[in-house]
Amino acid sequence: MSSEADQTAELMRRGRLLIVSPDELMLPGFEAYACVHLSYQFVPGPSPDGFSAWWSDSETGDDCVYKASVLERCHSLQGGYQQQALNRLFSGLLLRYRPDAIVVVGLHGCTLDLSRIASLMGVPAVLVLDQSADSLFADLDRSTSCWVRDALSRADLVCSLVKQTGFWQSSLSGLSEQVGPEELPARLAGFISSKTAHKSFDYALYEFCQRDHPLLVQMQMADTRHFQGCEAVLDLGCGAGIFLDLLRRQRIGAVGVERDPAIAEYGRGMGLDIITEDAIHFLEHQSHQFDGIYCAHFVEHLPFDVVRKLISLLAARLQDNGVLVLVFPDPESIRSQLLGFWRDPEHVRFYHPELIMTVARAAGLECEWSSYDDQPHEIVSFELAPEPLSQIEPMQMPVIDTDATYGFWDRLMRRLGLVSGRRFRSLEQQMRETQQVFLQHAQQQQQLISDMAVRTEHLWSVNRTWAWPDNVVLKLRKRS
């Protein structure tokens, strides 16, 4: 029978780890694992694609190393969802390599959430606290403290590379098991020996693998202005709770409803008030009324008869003079039609804002503001073949006279620096003809520039159809 050390070594050879660290760190005792590294560096920006983290380099060998750049603003823990820059890239690697465990070295805003993502996807997580965790529990606001504690509690192990103080130990007490660096290899071997099946695809995987939280924060931030002065807002179909967090930061009371238990639990881990329930069922059995309701990217998941029912129920849950904000993909947006809409596995169909406004009026709601009307969609027709441009004719320069044209006396006077009257008049005529040629050529160039400007403006007008917003925002108010 092989020794316990031999069994541990064999388990390590069979195991695969995903290591996330600021550099290609290899912790002692990890050499025998098949390791995939996600290393990252903070950069001031700007982002090349609108995301807060992007691949800066990748190379493959015996060990895979993926290098990411992260915006510097995602370094600190403060900020919640807008700090979660690495979630999307990390989730993609989890799906691709299906590791037996993940190891996150150092806790920053961009890495704190990774243990929660791993937990959602059924992968054991180890958080390794280095010097970056010196002030982990100091000077955090309430929402960030909830996030930190939930992330630590979702980790299977917490390991400290620095000497812990009593304050740390008391803060970590009861959240997750703590081990020393020397214990890590054997404990990881235990995870591998008891490995479980990876989670199959569900909507939670889409939520965290294809959606970028910092980008969604930027997209939804402007919608908070519609709820200024509200005290009780409902976010129906709130997902991970990004809009709830934006309202909380503006001290607007809000509650969310989310049907997916994993996504709802994830949002509650951010300290948010989220009810796990089907949206329609909640509205049908809820007697409380709200002075504001936010329903973003929900109607496109429903057939039309359910949309009519939904809007009627939303109107019933609004107080008189209450505000309902609906956000959904604009069917007239080419980008939405071609690039975004069908990424979501549960999208059913597009709804035109005029149709939704008509349904809302029938339910006793009036449209107070519409992003669709705020930016009119001008339709510009165009021919498949472009209009021909003006042509520039080649310059036909006048023939310049030479000495051979004149007689002996004209040539002699020229050598003496003199010009005869006959030759002077000839040169004047040549100059006038040359000026006329240049003038005609300049006029042709100016006409071509004018034609190009007209064509460019027309093409730009056609191109502006790509610039229409991807989403429609309707601000509706309940008539008293």
Image: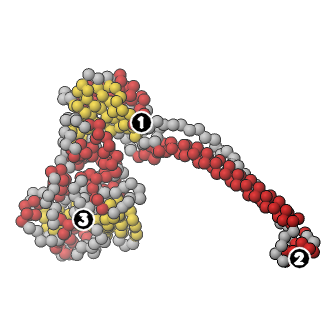
Q: Amino acid at mark 3?
A: Val
Q: Can the viewer see residue 336?
A: yes
Image point 85% across, 74% down: which residue?
414
Instruction: Name the image colouring.
Output: secondary structure
Q: Secondary structure at mark 3?
A: strand
Q: Amino acid at mark 1?
A: Asp
Which quadrant of the figure has residue 345?
top left
Image point 32% across, 23% down: which residue?
363
- The answer to whether residue 293 is above or below residue 4 is above
* Residue neighbourhood size for the residue with mark 2, other residues' Cα within 10 Å, grouped as few (<14), some (14–19), many (≥20): few
Q: Amino acid at mark 2?
A: Leu
* Residue at mark 2 to residue at mark 3: CA–CA distance: 98 Å
Dot 1 or dot 3, earlier in sequence: 3
Residue 377 location, x and y as percent? 48, 37
* Residue at mark 1 to residue at mark 3: CA–CA distance: 48 Å
* Left-right relation of 151 to 174: right
Which quadrant of the figure has residue 227?
top left
Residue 52 location, x and y as percent? 34, 57
Q: Which residue is mark 3?
A: 103
Residue 374, labelled with which disc?
1
* Residue at mark 1 to residue at mark 2: CA–CA distance: 81 Å
Q: Nearer the viewer, residue 408 or 279?
A: 408
Q: Secondary structure at mark 2?
A: helix
* Residue neighbourhood size for the residue with mark 3, other residues' Cα within 10 Å, grouped as few (<14), some (14–19), many (≥20): many
Q: Which residue is mark 2?
A: 412
